[in-house]
Image (spheres, rainbow, N blue to C red):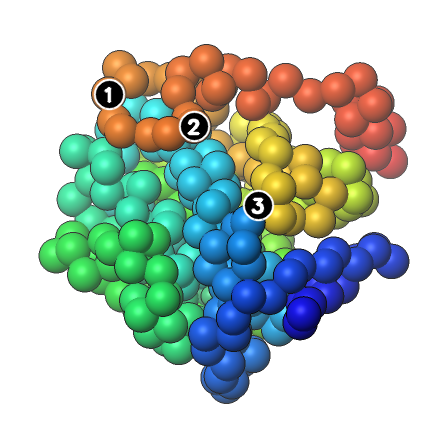
Amino acid sequence: MIRFIEKEPYSPIEHSYEVEDILYKGKSKYQEISVIKNPFFGKMLLLDNIVQITERDELFYHEMLTHVLMYAHPNPKRVVVIGGGDGGIVREVLKHKTVEKVYFVEIDDLVIKVSREFFPTVSCAVDDPRVDIKIMDGAEFVKSAKDIDVVIVDSTDVIGFARTLFTKEFFNNVKSAMTENGMFVTHTESLHHHKEVVVEMQESLHRVFPVVDLYTVCIATYPGNWWAFAVGSLKLNPRECRHPFEIDTKFYDDEIHAQSFVTPKFYKKLINRQLQW
Ligand code: SAM
């Protein structure tokens, strides 16, 4: 039996998956791309041997990274999705009737191509006429973007070419690109395995956005499982749902929205200590 061993990027931990089939292996200018099949998770997309999505559990991540802000924003019309080459976030964003335009900014067009072929239920909305695909670095895109209501970063880990999406300069450019109720969300690794990354990100956002928050969800296939999302908002509290719950989701709803912002005691302590430095 073949096994795929994933080495966590920041911790001395490995995860092992049985491989039923290797469906694709390729290399772009940016990364190695593979699609394997596991008997439990189904098809899995790997970038540089790190699990990005699986057929079985992609919905938890995609729904939570998208709908929390899409419901917190009173009228999200113009949305930027950075990264997310598999198309899962674009699919979820387009479930909202208010949306008129989605800038889908992915640096690596091969990820979109592979996802179209192997993950049709995830990439199904990328050809919608409201979607404008830009093959470029998201950090460059936001320098000239305007009138954006919601910015969602669905990137690879905070290493390599994704680093540009975690700098103060990037956050400032996101802020300048936004409308008055603008909101921003990015993944910020695991509360369990990467507390330092989580805290650092909150601190960086505090230097740029008036309102900063954090919510979490459990993802079976991401390191540490307890996955965190960092929010920066120009004025509105992201904990509030501002329109009636009506779209088709499997996991996210208004109760999950509220519950996802509950953070444990140790995290609050850590943040307070850091902010006094
Ligand atoms: N949900 C996944 C996770 O958290 O592991 C991420 C999935 S998505 C495939 C990540 C995408 O971000 C990749 O396709 C990668 O090419 C893209 N990406 C990384 N850095 C980027 C950047 N600076 N600008 C635009 N896209 C970027």
Q: Nearer the viewer, residue 82 or 23?
A: 23
Q: Is residue 272 left or right of residue 258?
A: right
- In this view, the mark in front (1 or 2): 2
Q: Which of the two residues, 84 or 32, is positioned nearer the viewer here?
A: 32
Are circles 1 and 2 on residues that touch, CB within 8 Å? no
Mark sitting on residue 187: 3
The amino acid marked with disc number 3 is His
Image position, residue 45 (x, y; %):
50, 63
Vertical relation: 170 (above or below) 252 = below
Q: Nearer the viewer, mark 3 or mark 2?
A: 2
Instruction: Give the residue at x 33% y 73%.
Output: 113
* Residue 246 circle label: 1
Residue 263 shows up from this direction: yes
Sequence-wise first label, 1 or 3 = 3
Location of residue 149 by image quarter: top left
> Residue 251 shows which numbered tag?
2
Q: Is 132 positioned to the left or the right of 195 in the image?
A: left
Name the mark on residue 117: none
Q: Is residue 201 left or right of residue 122?
A: right
